[in-house]
Structures are given as structure tokens and as C-alpha cells.
Image (cartoon, coloured by chain):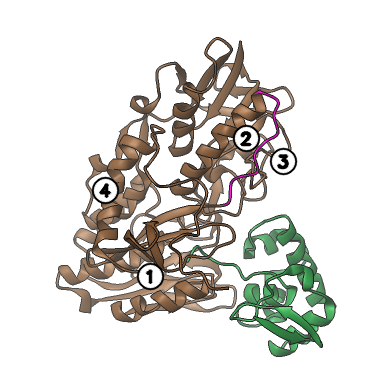
Chain colours: A green, B brown
Amino acid sequence: MEKMLAEKPVNVNEEGYLLEFAQWDKDIANAIAVEEKVELRDDHWKAIEWIQSEFKKDSPLSIRGIKNSGALNIKEFYELFPGGPLKKASKIAGIPKPKSCI
Amino acid sequence: MKNLIILGAGTSGTMMANHLVSKLPKQEWNITIVDQYKTHYYQPGFLFLPFDIYKEQDVKKEGKKFIPKGVNYIQKKIEKILPKENKVQLENETIPYDLLIVATGSKIAPQETEGMNGPNWHKNIFDFYTYEGSLALRNKLRDWKGGKLVIHITEMPIKCPVAPLEFAFLADTYFRKKGMRDKVDITYVTPLSGAFTKPKATAALHYLLEEKGIKEVIDFNIDRVDYENNKIIDYADTEVEYDLLVTTPTNMGDDLIKRSEMGDQLNFIPTNKATLQSLENENIFVIGDASNIPASKAGSVAHFEAEILTENIQNYIKGKELKEEFDGHANCFIETGNGKALLIDFNYEQEPVQGSFPFAAIGPLSLLKESKLNHMGKLAFRWIYWNMLIKGIPIPFVTAKMTKKGKQITI
């Protein structure tokens, strides 16, 4: 379905995750962050960039990956995106949420 | 003579040996398969073993029986792959290859989580992804008096992502049949956003959890197991207490991949998801759980990969362009308890939806819907596995590439 974010039309799924990463930009990230009640600061952007680089490599997102990345520690990650940090950060980063096969 | 070596004689490796033996010219190619273990396990059966639905002999056979004549079978430990030298180092010999297929799979790594692999491992903390774990759990369940049963996933990716949920459904049936369901509290703990994560499946199937009284704890990323106080604790300090913990530990590629410095941080080999060629070495191909491709880690996926890889191996040998044909296709029966099961059919792009399979509108199997026939299909699959699948005999009407026919797809 189409949705307006930062005054731009984007394709999202039922849960508001972007369907096309190519449509993502920083304004859109900010607009999603507002919906998720997260105010994006430098540390958030560091996390978002790291998540996007993993996504481009087809690497599955996991807490282990974050632990080993050196980009940020896990406690910080939870503080940055309270309650379900992986799915929230993914949503703001414009990539699909980590999922199973059903 | 040229040498093609297959590492690993599990589902993928055995299938490839059977496919390739009749496809490669015998006067030009030697095919060798290496695996240190004697036993070939039917891994989907590990789900049924704990509930006394299958017996030991149903899930294991001697691996040698499935390696075709004309393929050399070396039963030795693999020390290292030397990709720059095109050699594989075994425990007491080194063998050269022109073409290498890595099929070394993935395995559980409970040592990756603090406290998991401690003094209570296989006492009140179990896995069911190994023969030993599954059998130990069966013995535990046989005289367990009840309490808090926690079924837990550490992190993705895992082999057969839906197996822990099937375990929860089967546990519900098992304890009800024993007349002690009221003494068992079942909780499903996942690092994901739910037991179901895809919109169509969530809508169609969430009732199963409610119907069976299975509680969900979501977004739980385990930090450690406090085995002294019987609880698991996540990074947000959420605690879940258990009397019996059935966990799915971190899954990792074989240590061999680490020793060979060929893997990512989980020891999976970076692989082209459409051609199955390794990204680093053009004469190395990767099949099944050993690769990092974003498909489910499951025998069903390996089965479809094998058909496409067989073609690509022939293309590579002839110097032709590789086919970018693997679409992530998986086709799996999912046990839902009470003698019923679901069937799902999906790929990289298409989430599981309702419909009929394998024939549009006719079925006879229904997709994403519980039925007794699907359960019969799941049980019949064991026979298909031993007698057709790993021998490389095509399964009628089931194609390597997913079909959209018969699926209720709305855009």
C-alpha cells in the first residue's frame, strides 16, 4: 500500500515497513522515527547505517551481530530503540523486519 | 582426470553425489565425497522422537548405503579447505580438487550463550536439533511431572525456523493425551516479533496459539541462562522462568569453515543466492545450510538447490554461463498437533499464502491451512526422504522453482 511519509509517497506493508529500500532517505527515516516515538540522534544514525550495511550484504540481523560489530554495545542499542530494538531500528532504516518463514 | 569433491554426506551432499554420478562423464571426472560420520540422520524426525512418535531406527541409517557406486567415499575428518591451492586437507592426507562442493551444514552452538551448555545441559535444558538432544529429551518427557515448559529460540538463522513452533504444538497434544495438560504451562519465547512473523500466516494461524493455550514472549534476545535459578534473561533484563527449557541454540556453520577462514561471523560461506557459487572462489559451490543465502535452512531448500546446482556444475564445466535460477523455494509440512499439519510453499519474494498444492484448485493438499491430509503428507515424507529425495529421484509435480499457480496472491 502507498503511504505519505515526509511528504513523499512510499510503498509500505501492513505494518508500515518499507517495501522498497530504494525509496528510503533520511527524511523518511525521521518520519518513521516520529511514529515510533524515537528521536534520532548521532548514535541512532550509527546504528541505522550499520543495519543497512548488513542488509546490503544479506546478513541476518541479530543481537550477536551488533555485539561483534563494535559500532555500539547492546545496552546502548536497547536504550536507543526501547522495546524490540531490532524491529524498530529495521523499520526506521527502511529494511524488512527480521522474520521467520511463516 | 579431474576431481570433484563434495564435503559432507548429509542431505545436500548425498543428493549431489547421486545427481552428479550420472551427469558427469566418467572418463573425465572422479567424484569423491568426504564425511567423518557413519550415520545419516533423518533430521526432520528429531521433532517426533521426543514425543515417542518416531523410534530411534526411524531417523538413522548407515550413510554408505546412499552413496552411489562410482563415487569414492572417504570417511575421514576434514581439517581444512585450502582454496588458494585447490586442495582439501583431511586428517592424514591432502587431496586436490578442480571443483569443490561444500555441504557441511550447520549445527547448534549452545556454548555461544552463557550458562546454556553448563551443568544442566540435557538435565533440564535440552535441544532437539541433535540425535542425542532429542533422545535425552524423550527420556526426560516420559516421566516429567509437569511444570513450566519453555520453548525458546536464541537467534536467527536456525535450521528449520518453524520446528520450535511445531514442537510447542506437539507438546500440547502430547500432554493432553497423557491427561496432564493442566499441569504443564507452555510458553514460546522468540527473538522475533511473534511466533508468526509474516502477515498472511499471522492472520491465518495465530488462532493455533490461543486454541492450544500457548503463551508468547516476543522480542526476547537472550543474554544468559541462569541455570541455578532456572530462568533465562534477556538484554533488557526480562526474565522467563522454566522448569524444563527446550532451547534452539545459535546455529553455526561447521568449525571447518572457520579453520579455513571462509565464513562470516556465523561460519556460513558467502554465496551467490541465485547461482550457489561461492563469492570468493569460482570453483567452489555451496549447498544447503552451509551457505549464507537468505533462504530457510531446511532439507526442502537443499532439495530444490540440488537440482539447480546440478545444472550449474555442468554449465561451469562446459564453460557456459551459470543459471541464476535459485529463487529461495521451500516447501514444508508444519505439524500443528492433533494429527493435523499445514503445508507452506514460498520463496525469497513470495510469503506463504493460502491455496492448493501441487495442482491449482485441485490440491489435494491445502496451503497454510490445517488438515489431516497434510499430516499424512508429513509422515509419508520420511519414506520419500530415504527412498527418493537423497537418492536424487525427482518427486512428481514438485518443481525446483516455485509456481504461483493455485496460490491466493493479492498485490
Q: CA distance from mark 4 to mark 2?
A: 31 Å
Residue picked out by circle 4: B380
Above or below B296: residue B73: above
Q: Residue at x 53, y 45 (%)?
A: B289
Label 3 crowding class (10 Å Cα cut-off): few <14, some 14-19, many 20+? some
Q: Is residue B111 visible?
A: yes
Q: For this view, does B285 lie left or right of residue B281?
A: left
Tag on residue B39?
A: none
- The residues colored magenta run B318-327
Q: CA distance from mark 1 to mark 2?
A: 39 Å
What's the residue type where badge 2 is placed? Phe
Measuring from the top left, give residue A68's x and y in whole percent: 70, 58
Q: Give me the disc on residue B285.
A: 2
Location of mark 1 (residue): B150
Q: Residue at x 58, y 28 (%)?
A: B79
Magenta span includes B252: no
Work out which quarter of the rendered image holds the N terminus of chain B and state it. Answer: top right
Residue found 63% across the figure and 25% down from its top: B99
**Figure quadrant of residue B370:** bottom left
The kind of residue tagged 1 is Val
Q: Of the residues shown, which amino acid type is indicated by label 3?
A: Leu
